[in-house]
């Protein structure tokens, strides 16, 4: 009987279900391993009241990825967009977000099993790329940017596997705006446009970045804009977000139209200007919280 019991036990063991080993999912690297800086220039055409916004994107030395997209939250519409070679501009559906993606790829590149191949024009660490620009009637202010690095994602054999990857790796395959590196730069805003005059009474408006002085800016009053309603503490000028040195408002009629204007002063060193800047912008709020902004043309002198 012992042999029979042995055989029966063996048969029961063979009938038990075999548990397959759990499949390990390897998550791709998040597309945010970049150290980015954005240089922005807002040029102003006073004849057409039109702003041209231009950007240079730099990838830092500590970055672990190439930069493959650059996007901005802007007040629409924008027009006349320009792009560096191999980059494609686009507007996000359902959002006031405009930007560019590196799309040019090598036709002879190897098939390495990556779902989206890298572009040959991505911005590598220690490199910078200019040529991103567009035009807008809306005045400048500070807007949010989104930058992503290239992260290879292996081709999935089927839709079910792709869905499992997305569920297991939300930090990698989640929403674009949650994964991107973000920051603040200059761009068109929904602020009410106002006219300003840098260096009232002078033209062109020359600024020497080495001078230890303040630059006067007049916020021009009009039939639709009362400068008495300006919140002096809210004013910011240039990309440096310079604060005014004035603690008491000074009202003058600088353009002789019989309507008071507000003259404020900002230290040159805090304006954030560079050698290639052709406009200086100012933003602020009225006492009721309404945002406004404007810009005037400038000429940077003795700059190397």
Image (tube, helix red, strand yellow):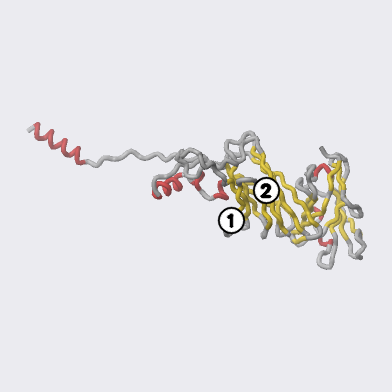
* Quadrant occupied by the N terminus: top left
Q: Which mark is residue 132?
A: 2
Callout 2: SS: strand
Q: In the depicted view, which residue is nearer to us: 255 or 304? A: 304
In the displayed image of the protein, which residue is found farthest to the top? 2
Judge from the rendering whether residue 232 lies leftward or rightward of residue 108; answer left or right: right
Judge from the rendering whether residue 250 lies leftward or rightward of residue 99; answer left or right: right
Q: Which residue is mark 1?
A: 92
Residue 159, percent from left and from top: 40, 50
Q: Which mark is residue 241?
A: none
In the displayed image of the protein, which residue is found farthest to the front? 108
Q: In the depicted view, which residue is nearer to us: 274 or 219? A: 274
Residue 135, percent from left and from top: 71, 55
User: Where 164 falls versus 220 (above or below)?
Assistant: above
In the displayed image of the protein, which residue is found farthest to the left? 1
Q: Which residue is depicted at the point 85% across and 60% down? A: 220
Residue 112, percent from left and from top: 46, 38
Q: Residues within 10 Å of mark 2 (few under 14, many from 20)?
A: many
User: Where 24 falls versus 295 (above or below)?
Assistant: above
């Amino acid at each position: 009987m012992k042999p029979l019991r042995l055989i029966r036990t063996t048969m029961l063991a063979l009938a038990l279900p075999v548990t397959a080993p759990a499949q390990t999912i390897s998550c791709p690297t998040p597309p945010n391993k970049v150290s980015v800086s954005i240089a922005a220039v807002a040029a102003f055409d006073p004849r057409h009241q039109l702003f041209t916004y231009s950007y240079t994107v730099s990838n830092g030395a500590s970055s672990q990825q190439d930069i493959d997209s650059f996007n901005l939250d802007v007040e629409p519409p924008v027009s006349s967009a320009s792009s560096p070679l191999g980059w494609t501009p686009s507007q996000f559906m359902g959002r006031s977000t405009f930007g560019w993606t590196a799309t040019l790829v090598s036709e002879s590149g190897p098939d390495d099993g990556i779902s989206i191949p890298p572009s040959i024009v991505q911005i590598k660490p220690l490199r910078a790329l200019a040529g991103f620009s567009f035009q807008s009637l809306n005045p400048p202010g500070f807007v949010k940017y989104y930058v992503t690095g290239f992260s290879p994602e292996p081709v999935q054999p089927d839709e079910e596997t792709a869905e499992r990857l997305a569920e297991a790796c939300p930090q990698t395959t989640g929403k674009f705006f949650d994964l991107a590196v973000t920051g603040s730069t200059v761009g068109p805003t929904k602020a009410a446009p106002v006219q300003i005059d840098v260096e009232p009474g002078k033209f062109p408006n020359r600024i020497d970045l080495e001078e230890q002085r303040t630059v006067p800016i007049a916020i021009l009053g009009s039939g639709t804009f009362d400068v008495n309603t300006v919140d002096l503490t809210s004013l910011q000028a240039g990309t440096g977000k310079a604060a005014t040195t004035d603690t008491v408002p000074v009202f003058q009629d600088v353009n002789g139209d019989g309507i008071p204007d507000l003259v404020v002063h900002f230290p040159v060193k805090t304006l954030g200007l560079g050698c290639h800047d052709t406009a200086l912008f100012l933003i602020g709020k009225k006492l009721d919280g309404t945002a406004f902004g404007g810009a005037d043309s400038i000429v940077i002198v003795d700059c190397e």
